[in-house]
Image: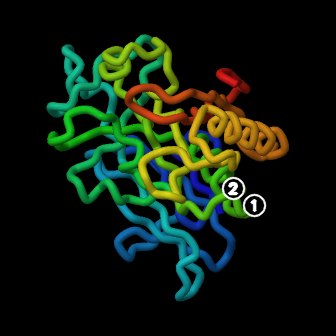
Amino acid sequence: MSLKPSGEAGYALPFSQWYETVLPGKGLDITLPPGYVFMIDDKVWTPTWRAPQSAQTLSATIRSGFETVATINIFVLEPHSNIDEKGWLNGYRIGTYPRNPPKGFIKLEGPNDHDLDLSPHFKLGQFLCKQQSGHWPKYVLVSQNNVRRLEALLTALNDDKTTEAETFFVMSGFRTPFYNSAIGSAKFSRHMYGDAADIYVDYEPLNGNMDDLNRDGKITKADANWLYDYAQKLYKHRTDLPKGGIGAYRANAVHGPFVHVDGRGTTARWGR
């Protein structure tokens, strides 16, 4: 089974819960085995579904007979070209990209959209930028490459009995260029492209801080280093996953230790 925006490279669905993005009016090409159907609003679409002309979210299913084998949230993007000359998009401040602006943004209409599934263990709201908390709509980017990397890391940690966490705490996901500049982050940060997440394991105890992963009785940068080393070993052997960055960070006055994971497409390491 594969999906791809028309004109782009296709890929096999990595999970039975997944998401896809497409610009308004553009097509989504669908390739399925015999006996499978792709459905939106109880209508079968094949081999191409064409997106509506406005930004919105639609739920699609892939079925075999009466069985649903995959559920896909399709995000019709708000085009980047709709940002005004001052950097605002429907009252939400995006700012200006220093280079390579994205084609568009996922639109969240209201608080309920926080819970839209991206993959088995991650939801859209986890990656929102920390700005304009009371304003709607909001906009976000979340790269499929990095979600795949995060899913692989979380699954491995659970399989090894390191944790039973259902997700990572995403301390920072997408950042608008405006917000990224305001906090003094790197000019070309991958966060601006939805391609990075600053994460930690928060399960036992559930207290808003990194767990004691190295079992030394303390919560320090050593726990971020432990997670960094674990991720580096995993990604080295998982050649099926996109390449990306890993960074380890110590605690400061406003947050505990954490690890940065991104899906930039090339290997990068720092902070260890």
Q: Residue at x 57, y 49 (%)?
A: 211
Residue 8 position (above or below residue 162): above
Q: Is residue 48 visible?
A: no
Name the secondary structure under disc 2.
Answer: helix
Alpha carbon distance from label 1 to label 2: 5 Å
**Label 2: few (<14), some or many (≥20) within 10 Å?**
some
Query: Closest to the observer: 220 or 110?
Result: 220
Q: Where is residue 48 shown, x and y percent of the image?
A: 50, 57
Amino acid carrying label 1: it is Asp
Name the secondary structure under disc 1.
Answer: loop
Kindly indicate whether the residue at mark 2 contacts the one at mark 1 (C-beta within 8 angstroms): yes
Say left or right for 177 vs 1. left
Amino acid carrying label 2: it is Leu
The tag on residue 157 is 2
Q: Where is residue 166 shown, x and y percent of the image?
A: 53, 62
Q: Where is residue 180 shown, x and y percent of the image?
A: 37, 20
**Label 1: few (<14), some or many (≥20) within 10 Å?**
few
Q: Residue at x 34, y 26 (%)?
A: 176
Mark 1 lies on residue: 160
Q: Where is residue 250 shown, x and y percent of the image?
A: 56, 27
